[in-house]
């Protein structure tokens, strides 16, 4: 559990190493045993590791095995063994098909050439940029984004560790003891396991895990996907790496908004999943690089889907959209290559039927709760929405005109130079269009399209960032190639580190110019992080001093006690700093029955037998009052008036006070009859 003030960034080196190993090693071993190309195996490692942890947690829970090092190792060994066997089978199948002239395998790729080093250097550079940006606003790894859902995202994995389960079918019991259903818990499987391995609190583990996700997993995934789409070139690797952390919405806005950490994990591993799809449906003969042959790419996709779903269903939906557009592009290309109009029409009819079936499935599978999520109606005027869209500046973020210009150049470059990846244009335009419709229109009709993303502007704009990174990469590559033509031919042909001098010079100039804009980008990123990590008091749930005060009061609460607290005042963070059980863990869990009765009437426990009976059933013996309600609370604070007023009841004895909080102990209870 968190001991406020005990950890600094400089003290998290061991946690960082353990986190990096957990994110990379299980998946990297599986990828290499599957006989993927080394760089591809590295890029896909976080995705495969996510499947390893999340699926292992589900099986451990189903078998009644407490989560720990043993089920983790068993899951990693099982994944590695399965991938080794499938890799051997794929080699046999490829050989048999090649011998019959029905298959052409990928040519071998150099293992440690200039592109490999460019990818590693690019990712290392952006990791430093991310670390500097984050550490200036998250001045401690104990810093928490001040959002309504943060308490669940740090308390649920702590509860999972205590109860020995991190399964997606069990984790919701933190909120409701009798809960059954599904909740994506891959993020918690990582953070709780990191805490288990290192002894760090779940809060610190979460901060370090987020750093590894946005600084390592996401950039290397973008690099591998860009190489698969645009070819194996140094400029592609460097451009994709730099652009991966240039936009504000992802990763920076998603680090604070919500907080949507499970969604952040899903988006971070999404490029690797798309790369697997691209490996299956790559254009004939181009590009020269892919994550693996078609069989191995298919294996990766099948293995990856469970992890993607248990990371966050939004990521799976976005994968379906991007993969669908990729496959649609391949099918339409095949159709227009046919000489017979009859064949073309047959293929087009199949496309229309498939799209109709997908639309029907969306209607059948539509979640009523997701459809109704969020306040209906536009949040921006159409003109304001256009400005936000064009400048990649949603929800209080600052405009990024240089990046917008790079993406615009990329759109032209994709249309003119990259026939096989033109599906990126409808992917980018479509996701941005959904974002615009959400913030400028948001009618019931619009919600038929936006419900899979909870009708939420941030989630929708996040879905647009991966296409934007890839299209922007095409733009930078086009600028480099144009610049290389301006170098005198006598110099352009000379070699520098395996590159032609003209290309090397142009790469330095173009990417250097982009780096000159890095200050503007960093200011935009820090601006949005500051909003969530250093808000005004009314928008804060639990500040550092308040966490220390709760920790101080917890020393006077027995370990087996149940404490009543008003979650809108941040008092439920008592669990995070002490492990003491809360009657109502979050602001979303004031359910009918004993919880609602005690929330509204706990101050009458000494005079009302029904309240006393409920308190006895729930074992509530302590209460905490004080603190400032969160600004969104409104009238919902009144739901907890019975807790807030226990200080006026003789049935409660004041025990201690710290900061804005006061701790009370129940000393009387009205018995019936």
Image (cartoon, grey):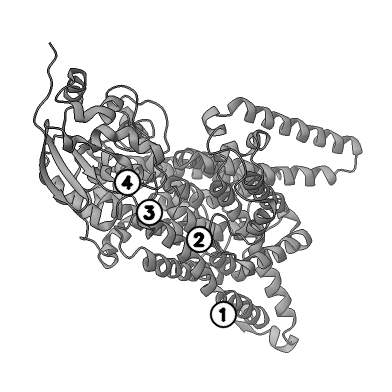
**Residue 41 in the figure: left or right of residue 20:** right
Q: Which callout, 4 or 3, points to the residue nearer the camera?
A: 3
Is disc 4 in contact with disc 1, using a CB cutoff of under 8 Å?
A: no
Give the labeled residue for mark 3.
145
**Residue 475 in the figure: left or right of residue 250:** right
Q: Which callout, 4 or 2, points to the residue nearer the camera?
A: 4
10 Å crowding of disc 3: few (<14), some (14-19), many (20+): many
Give the labeled residue for mark 2.
219
Distance between the Cα atoms at labels 4 and 3?
Answer: 11 Å
- Mark 2 lies on a secondary structure that is helix
Name the residue at the top extreme.
673
Instruction: Residue 554 in the image: state x and y as whole percent.
Output: 15, 45
Instruction: Residue 200 in the image: state x and y as whole percent.
Output: 24, 54
Q: 99 or 640, which lies in front?
A: 640
Is residue 614 visible in the rendered image? The answer is yes
Lower sequence index among marks 4 and 1: 4
Instruction: Residue 43 in the image: state x and y as whole percent.
Output: 49, 56
Q: Kindly identify the residue that appears in the image at 41 percent across and 47 percent down.
A: 49
Distance between the Cα atoms at labels 4 and 1?
Answer: 47 Å
Is disc 1 in contact with disc 3, using a CB cutoff of under 8 Å?
A: no
């Amino acid at each position: 559990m968190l001991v406020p003030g005990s950890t600094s960034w400089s003290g998290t080196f061991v946690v960082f190493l353990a986190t990096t190993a957990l994110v990379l090693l299980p998946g990297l071993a599986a990828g290499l045993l599957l006989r993927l190309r080394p760089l591809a195996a590295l890029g896909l490692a976080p995705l495969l590791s996510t499947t390893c942890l999340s699926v292992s947690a589900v099986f451990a829970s189903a078998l009644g095995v407490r989560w720990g090092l043993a089920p983790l190792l068993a899951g990693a060994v099982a994944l590695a063994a399965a991938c080794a066997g499938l890799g051997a089978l794929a080699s046999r199948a490829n050989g048999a098909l090649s011998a019959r002239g029905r298959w052409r395998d990928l040519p071998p790729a150099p293992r440690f050439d200039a592109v490999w080093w460019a990818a590693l250097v690019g990712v290392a550079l952006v990791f430093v940029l991310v670390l500097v940006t984050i550490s200036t606003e998250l001045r401690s790894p104990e810093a928490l984004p001040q959002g309504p859902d943060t308490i669940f995202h740090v308390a649920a994995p702590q509860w999972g560790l205590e109860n020995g389960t991190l399964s997606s079918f069990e984790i919701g019991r933190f909120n409701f003891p009798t809960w059954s259903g599904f909740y994506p818990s891959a993020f918690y499987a990582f953070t709780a396991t990191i805490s288990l391995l290192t002894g760090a609190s779940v809060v610190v583990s979460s901060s370090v895990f987020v750093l590894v996700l946005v600084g390592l997993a996401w950039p290397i995934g973008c690099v591998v996907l860009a190489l698969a789409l645009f070819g194996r070139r140094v400029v592609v690797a460097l451009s994709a790496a730099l652009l991966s952390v240039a936009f504000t919405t992802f990763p920076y806005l998603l680090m604070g908004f919500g907080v949507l950490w499970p969604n952040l994990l899903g988006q971070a591993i999404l490029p690797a999943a798309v790369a697997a799809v691209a490996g299956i449906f790559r254009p004939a003969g181009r590009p020269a690089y892919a994550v693996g042959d078609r069989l191995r790419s298919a294996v990766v996709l099948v293995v990856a889907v469970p992890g993607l779903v248990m990371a966050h269903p939004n990521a799976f939906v976005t994968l379906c959209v991007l993969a669908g557009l990729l496959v649609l592009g391949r099918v339409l290309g095949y159709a227009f290559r046919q000489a017979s109009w009859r064949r073309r029409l047959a293929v087009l009819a199949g496309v229309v039927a498939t799209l109709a079936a997908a639309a029907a499935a969306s209607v059948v599978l539509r979640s009523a709760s997701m459809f109704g999520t969020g306040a209906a109606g536009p949040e921006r005027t159409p003109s304001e929405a256009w400005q936000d869209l064009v400048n990649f500046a949603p929800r209080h973020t600052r405009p990024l005109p240089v990046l917008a210009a790079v993406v615009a150049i990329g759109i032209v470059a994709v249309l003119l130079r990259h026939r096989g990846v033109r599906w990126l244009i409808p992917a980018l335009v479509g996701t941005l269009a959904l974002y615009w419709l959400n913030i400028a229109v948001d009618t019931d009709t619009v919600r038929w399209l936006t419900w899979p993303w909870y009708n939420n502007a941030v989630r929708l704009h996040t879905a647009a960032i991966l296409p934007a990174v890839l299209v922007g990469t095409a733009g930078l590559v086009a600028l480099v190639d144009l610049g290389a033509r301006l170098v005198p031919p006598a110099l352009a042909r000379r070699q520098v580190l395996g590159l032609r001098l003209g290309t090397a010079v142009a790469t330095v100039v173009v990417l250097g110019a982009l780096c000159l804009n890095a200050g503007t980008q960093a200011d935009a990123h820090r601006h949005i992080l500051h909003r969530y990590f250093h808000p005004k008091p009314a928008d804060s749930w639990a500040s550092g001093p308040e966490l220390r005060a709760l920790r101080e009061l917890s020393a006077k609460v027995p370990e087996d006690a149940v404490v009543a607290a008003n979650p809108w005042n941040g008092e439920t963070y008592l669990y995070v700093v002490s492990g003491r059980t809360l009657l109502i863990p979050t602001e979303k869990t004031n359910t009918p029955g004993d919880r609602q009765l005690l929330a509204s009437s706990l101050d009458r426990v000494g005079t009302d037998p029904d309240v006393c009976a409920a308190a006895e059933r729930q074992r509530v013996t302590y209460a905490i009052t004080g603190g400032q309600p969160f600004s969104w609370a409104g009238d919902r604070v009144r739901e907890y008036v019975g807790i807030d007023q226990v200080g006026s009841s003789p049935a409660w004895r004041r025990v201690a006070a710290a900061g804005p909080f006061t701790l009370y102990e129940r000393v009387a209870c009205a018995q019936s009859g």
